[in-house]
Amino acid sequence: MSAGASRDVGMMAEVSQSSDLAQGGSVEQEGADHQEHIENETCPETLQAPIDISEVEPTNTKLEISDKESHHGDEDDSRNDPNHSLLKAATDAINEQCSCTDGSLEDKPKVSDETEEAPSFMEQSGGLVEEEEMSNGGLKRDSKETTKEDKGSLDAGECLQQSCNTDGETDIMYDCSQPPQPMHTTGEEPLCKDTTDGKDTEMIHEKSPEQSNIEASPNETKLNNGLMDSEQRQLEDDYKELADTASDNTLEDSGDFPGISSVVGGVTSDASPPTTPVQREEDVTAESWRTKRKHVFVLSEAGKPIYSRYGNEEALSSTMGVMMALVSFVQSGNNAIRSIHSDAQKVVFLQQGPLVLVSVSRAPQSEEQLRKELQYVYYQIISMLTQASVARIFERKKNYDLRRLLAGSEKILDSLLDLLDTDPGFLLGAVRCVALPSPLRDSLSSILTKAITPNLVFSILVAEQKLVTVVQERAVIEDCRLDPADLHLLLNLIGASSAFQAGEIWTPICLPRFNPDGYFYAYISYLDPECTVCLVLLSTDKESFYAVSGCKKKIQEAMEAQNSLQALAGALRCCSYSVSLVGVPELLHFVYKPLDIPETYRQLPQFTSPETDGPYSSEEERQRLFDLYRYLHCRIHSSARPLRLIYHVAEKETLLAWVTSKFELYTAFSSLVTKVGAINVITKLLRWIKREEDRLFIRYPPKYSTTPVPGKGAKSSKSDRTDSSQNGFFTGL
Amino acid sequence: MLPHEESTDSFKLVLLGSTDVGKSSLVLRYIRDDFREIVSTTGCAFFTQRINLQGKNLHFEIWDTAGQERYHSVCHLYYRGARAALLVYDITSKETFSRAQLWLQELQKYVLNGKMVIALVGNKSDLHDNRKVSTEDALAFAEQKQLLFMETSAKTGSGVNEVFEAVASKLLTLEKQKEENQHISRISLQETHSPSEGHRCCTSL
């Protein structure tokens, strides 16, 4: 299997460097407006897809890749000559480098002053920086991250790599925020020489003791107890102090709830640590905990645990302390730790303001994908607290226990992490729509467009966690659209809170991609007794509950008049479709994201995919398929070598991923399909989607609702509440 | 007649208490007679419930607030105009009981001249093996502060309807008193008014 992996890497190099080398597994086709590269991985040994993927991860450190390649290269030379020679050509220098590191990696921990020659990695991290820029949107970043780096001059010196030999290999990657050095191309020289900046060199040597630390605890579970204990004590002392300032530390508006701490007196000082739900009592020393597929931790800069996917954060405070130690150690050298790679696991770090998010994953995902997931976790936290208030809280009190404010939200984060592992929407940055006949969707949209009240900015209709339609207010959002990430977070919140199924909910919520520092007030209510159709109305006025509730009544009445709820229920019954509808037996599954959306509509990115039935009805198989999609996605979107088309023969199926200017498509075929057959199937599939696209997607989004003249909108159900439109949102416009 | 009927019709009731004491479960049991593992409430949840008590139709507007600190900023909005409050604590947690006392102090800031009906509710009475707050303590506190007091279990349903009914009947009694007061003032008003009206009548004639 790793043989396949090594060839795979070779192919990558080949494809990006010389597209005319169409020999062996690489086929070049003439596309309509682009080149297509088909990669063929016919090796029957690509059995264990996950492991295979982890090995070819483009973000793997060079050492790891080159190391394996040099071994497998020998084994496979005869079988895979062209590829290997290409590989050699591409990674010549690294192979040489590797042969010397091989020897030195055997027993003692060594700070290998290895050179990051490989352009792939340099570009990769360049891409990462860009990615962060993009995904951060309007977020404030600390100066380090914002340092705009010229992609071209992002050189090896910025991407330090150190490796030590634990049970396998552990590579620590972190990038430097020093001013970029001139492009360095000679791969053979040790790093400390080519980064002429003394600081870098110094840091590598400083790093050595830290290395041995990692040695001692390869899985980050053991720790320096003495240090943590004293810190812990200090933190506990701080609780008491905190109790006095508790009200200051709460949300920005919680001046509205003043004095509770002063009344609390002795009561809260011991009561203030939040009561953690009992269900999370998982033994964090148990093997079952250690072998979880993916851990996610959130901690504060003071090393205080905030969230852990598994186990009680309290029990993990020492582990998190170690993580924070790693982060701050690298930080002390004006640097930022990005990831640690070992044979079986990746540890990915993301620092966002005062929060540090860490993912420890055995899943075959790229570092970039893991970081994106951490970004979603961060956004979900922000969606509950806003970025500004999190920043303010930690400004005032470095070791504030954020779980106080996040109490009860573990379920929401848990469910987000589950979704991230199952829903391609997060990966694609697109939302899944309910398949509906377009006249029905249009009529529902027009109902929403009509039920308006001042300060109501978004009306969203959701059924079974999928989008039916969304209407936005013109004046507020004309040049801004609802980001799919925000919608994902919102849908996750709704899905995770069964409490929503009763009554009408009114809650502050922040849409981090829209505005990370401000709250919307969300009205959430189910429209049918079965709780499948959910209406979400977002207002900017926290006092407008009754007015917004009046809108819901109006919407409900209109729906009853038009019988839309029944029509919707009927459509929902046949909404999820089987892949067999396409009528091609070879096709097992697909994910399709149209890209030809008219920009003028500011349409939400959408995607569609059939039910995971047939061979993918079991949980494991579904996960396996999703892992394969992730792998293809990571290859397609690799910033170093973006691909247009991948033909990938996996253990149980053949996959083809294809990106054009019009769509992004991932398909899974039965393994008996041929290349030509697959292309034929895709042609049929595209034709089918074209026929169905009015049903599958929101093709023509509803017009904006216009700002109602105050008083003309929905009648408030209660007249005792006047709609104050003195919200900052409107006055600012 | 008309204003008095409106005022008996609709009562705003808020549920307050720490996280995880079972506020939403109480409401769910009361409204739907259902019990589920509920995750914590997000923000506030609004319910309406019609009940018939002593031959009168009452309309409860129930605000179930989230216990979490982060939602305090929104939820306090809904104390305003509230006619009744349930202060909920968990009998297996002393902390939640102390917290309930704080909620009371908080609440009293918003209550106009003590016209609010407040009930102290010890929930999770099915878990009596783990009881940490004795009935006596709670009762003593309730008496001292003139609160209604009851222990309930949203899980088994014991005491849930009783709490809401007790609150409703107390509200009705208060209404009746108020009504009587109003009646008196109305009569006196009419007394002072009628001569002038008569006077006007006379002049118009």
Image (cartoon, coloured by chain):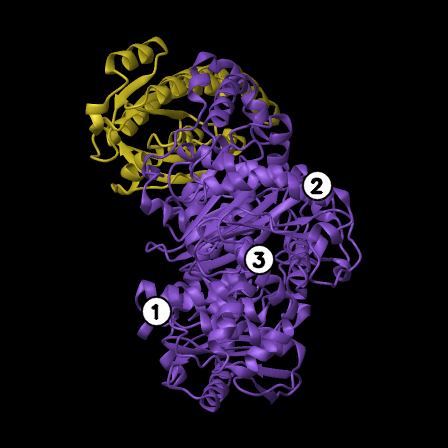
Farthest residue toward the right?
A182
In whole angstroms, how far apart are the C-alphas of marks 1 and 2?
65 Å
| SS for dot 1 | helix
Which quadrant of the figure contains the N terminus of chain B?
Answer: top left
Mark number, residue A101: 3
Q: Is residue A61 visible?
A: no
Count residues near mark 2 (Cα–Cα under 10 Å), then give few for <14, some for 14-19, many for 20+: few
Q: Position of residue B147 (x, y in %)?
A: 34, 16
Mark 1 chain: A
In terms of image quadrants, where is residue B14?
Answer: top left
Q: Callout 2, which amino acid?
A: Glu
* Residue that numbered label 1 is attached to: A573
The colour one sees for chain B in the rendered image is: yellow
The colour one sees for chain A in the rendered image is: purple
Mark 2 chain: A
Q: Callout 1, which amino acid?
A: Arg
Q: Earlier in the sequence, mark 1 or mark 3?
A: 3
* Residue that numbered label 2 is attached to: A202
| SS for dot 3 | helix
